[in-house]
Image (cartoon, helix red, strand yellow):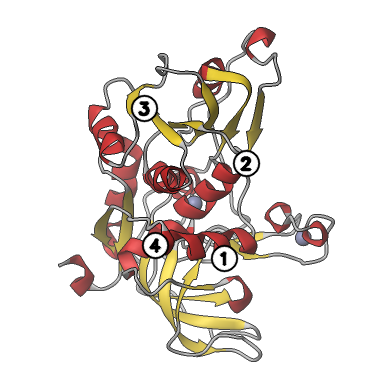
Amino acid sequence: MVLDTPGTSLRLAHDVAEREPGPGEVLVDVHACGVCRTDLHIRDGELRADRYPLIPGHQVVGTVLAAGDAAELEPGARIGIPWLGWTDGDCRYCRSGRENLCVGARFTGLDIDGGYATRTTADARYCFPLPAGYGDLEVAPLLCAGLIGHRALGLTGDAERLGLYGFGSSAHIVCQVALHQGRRVFALTRAEDTASQAFARSLGCEWAGDAMGRAPEELDAAIVFAPVGALVPAALRALAPGGVVVCAGIHMSDIPSFPYADLWRERSIRSVANLTRADARELLDLAPRVPVRTHVTAYALERANDALADVRAGRLEGAAVVVTRRTALQ
Ligand SMILES: [Zn+2]
Ligand SMILES: [Zn+2]
C-alpha cells in the first residue's frame, strides 16, 4: 500500500519492485503490521518524507526470507521491525546512548519503505526477535505503541498516580505495564467517549473520565498520547507539585498559553522522541512477564485506508493491525 502524495489515500500497488537485501540487510516476508497514529501524520503530510511514493508501516512482524552479507539473522527467524530503522552510530547522540535523537536517523515507514506490504527489507541490526508467546497480530502493537509508550512511562520516574490522556493503542499497553509496576492509573479521554473509558476500567484503571475535567486526585505524572495541544495545559493543571507531563506523540496541534502558576512548583513538560534499541529489548523482555495482552482489530492489507480511518475516528479498542495473510483474519 503506497502513499504517492501526502493528503491522499494509500494505493494498492502490484508493481513495486522487490529489493535484494544488501550487506547487513534482511528480506522479510511480512505477516502483520500495526497501525500507528504516526502513519496518519505521514498520510496527512504533517510529517514529511524526503521522497514519495513511500510505503508506510513501522510495527512490522515477519520472517526472514534471505539475509545479505554479514546480516546477523537467520532465514526463518520471526522478527519485528520498529520505527528506528537506521542510525549513523557516530553523532554526539549515538555516542552518548541516545540514538533515538540521532541527527542522521532513518525511520521505517517514512525514510525506509515499511510494512504495509507483503515483503520488505530492513537493516538486521535494528530488527528484534519476538517473544514466542505472542501471535503475529498480538505482538505487532508492541513495536511502536508499546515501545514509545514504555519509553514515555520510564520518563515519569517513580510516579505513583499516572494519568493517561487518550486511551488508544499505546495507552492500553502502558496501562498494563504501569499497573504491573504497582502504579495507580487514571484514564482521561474525550468526555463523550464512554466506550474508551469502559475499556480503560476493564484493564484495571481505577478511574476514567473527561480529560478536560478533574481527575479524582492530583496526578504525579501524565502521558499525553492524543495529538491535541489543549491537553497539555489540562494535564499540567491536574499535576501535583514536582509532576511531569510527557508528550508521547510525534505531532500535536499547538499548545495554548497558560499561566506560569500552573508550571510553578517544579512541574515540567517534556516530549519523548523515537526509541533506542535498548528500549526495544527492555519492553520485549518485560511484556511476556506482565503479561501484556494487546487488543487488536485486524484488517486485510488492502484495507489499510479503512484501518487508518478507524484509528483517526477512534472507532476501535486497542490497536489496528493490517495483515497480509487471509488466514490471520479468520
Ligand atoms: Zn547518530
Ligand atoms: Zn508509531
**Tag 2 near tag 4, CB within 8 Å:** no
Q: Earlier in the sequence, mark 1 or mark 2?
A: 2
Whole-angstrom CA distance, mark 1 to mark 2, is 17 Å
Residue 300: x %, y % from top left: 25, 63
**Residue 140, label in figure:** 4
Amino acid type, residue under disc 3 in the picture: Thr
What residue is pinned by disc 3?
189
Amino acid type, residue under disc 4 in the picture: Ala
Q: Quadrant of residue 310?
A: top left
Whole-angstrom CA distance, mark 2 to mark 4, is 23 Å
Residue toward you, 303 or 90: 90
Using the image, determine if residue 15 lies above or below residue 168.
below
Using the image, determine if residue 257 lies above or below residue 41.
above
Q: Earlier in the sequence, mark 4 or mark 1?
A: 4
Q: Earlier in the sequence, mark 3 or mark 1?
A: 3
Check disc 4: other Cα within 10 Å, few if <14, some if 14-19, many if 20+: many
Whole-angstrom CA distance, mark 3 to mark 4, is 24 Å
Using the image, determine if residue 154 lies above or below residue 135.
above
Check disc 1: other Cα within 10 Å, few if <14, some if 14-19, many if 20+: some
What residue is pinned by disc 1?
281
Using the image, determine if residue 305 lies above or below residue 323.
above
Helix, strand or loop at disc 3?
A: strand
**Tag 4 near tag 1, CB within 8 Å:** no
Amino acid type, residue under disc 1 in the picture: Arg
Quarter of the image for the C terminus: give it: bottom left
Residue toward you, 285 or 69: 285
Helix, strand or loop at disc 2?
A: loop
Amino acid type, residue under disc 2 in the picture: Leu
